[in-house]
Image: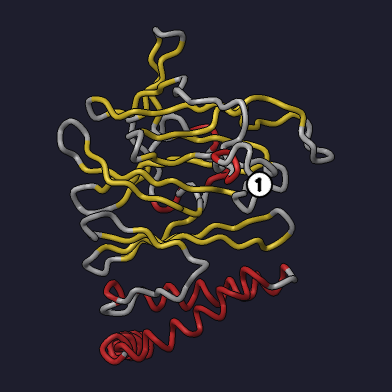
Amino acid sequence: MNFIRKTAILLNFTLLSTVLTFGQAGFQTAETDLAYYSDVMVSASEGKHRAIAMEKFNELFIKTLNQKGAYQYPFDSLKWISKKSPDDKSFRIFTWEVEVADGDYKYFGALQNADNKLFILQDNFKNTEGGLKDEEFNQESWLGALYYNLMDCHTTKGEKYYLLFGINRWNKFENIKLVDVLFFTNEGVPYFGKPVFHTKVNGEKNDVFYRLVFKYASDAQMTLNYNPGMEMIVLDNLVKKMSRIPGQGETLVPDGSYIGYEMKDGNWIRIDKIATQIMDEAPRPVPVLDKRKGKKINGN
């Protein structure tokens, strides 16, 4: 038996032994280290320190997720890591961001099926802007984002897919919010993007999008989420405006009005104007003395 074959057998045996002996205590120990690295990679004042902690975290997290029984372990103490699952708990998706330098964010993700199969998501957002409207992307061309909501959906044919609401801090001048579409092949492989968003232009032409993507000023606050009360995706309408940040120039900011996407026949249809109630003044409690006209404060 040659040296390479002996080495390969030894490595395989070592990995198998690690998987078999990792156990609950192993997950707890790993989580303690992961919580420390995640705190440093988010909170350290020096970018180089955040980058070092990021590398340590990524290596240990992926190694830990590959252990047998990892899917059942919650990793609840990793407060800086987004963890989202659908209603049926068939998978979970982790995403995280690290500011490695001023305004320079890196995005990472991992999707794990209930059978413990792991898919590493590799951010390729800044190389794929041209295909955002009508392209599918796989795990190696993922549009990196920190996901803050996940929603179960079905097409009219009963095919299951999921909406992923996320944010990407594009640069020091602009952020991006998006609604991407996650679906799985018959073999259980994840893909992103599906033609489920419809926008009518001038009431006639129907544009179809594989995802919704909005770039806006980094010093603005933009709403983009599903509103269960209204039963639609609600987002701020964006308009062009000169930025207040030196060197940015013209950018997009919310104008106070809202746009919606409503589910109809398995697709999300754009609604240009959502009815809102505009008040003459801010709401406030009824003053105590309003019901005591002509009386002093002590009731006399």
Neighbour class for label 1 at 10 Å: few (<14), some, many (≥20)?
A: few
250 relative to 31, above or below:
above
Q: How far across and how far down the image is residue 210, in percent?
A: 39, 33
Q: Residue furthest right?
A: 246
Answer with left or right where residue 30 lies relative to residue 72.
right
Residue in the image at 69% along x and 73% along y: 44
Question: Where is residue 10 shown, x and y percent of the image?
Answer: 33, 91
Q: Quadrant of residue 72?
A: bottom left
Residue at figure coordinates x 24%, y 30% from the top left: 266
Which residue occupies 39% across, 40% down? Answer: 226
| Residue 204 rendering spot, x and y as whole percentages | 39, 7
Expressed as whole percent of the image width and height from the top left, the position of residue 191 reads 34, 46
Residue found at the very far left of the displayed protein: 157
- Is residue 2 at least partly visible in the picture? no
Looking at the picture, does residue 24 appear above or below residue 44? Answer: below
Q: Quadrant of the N terminus?
A: bottom left
Q: Is residue 232 visible?
A: yes
Position of residue 38 in the picture relative to residue 111 (left or right): right
Vertical relation: 201 (above or below) 276: above
Query: Helix or strand or loop: what does disc 1 sit on?
Result: loop
Residue found 36% across the figure and 41% down from its top: 181
Q: Which residue is mark 1?
A: 296
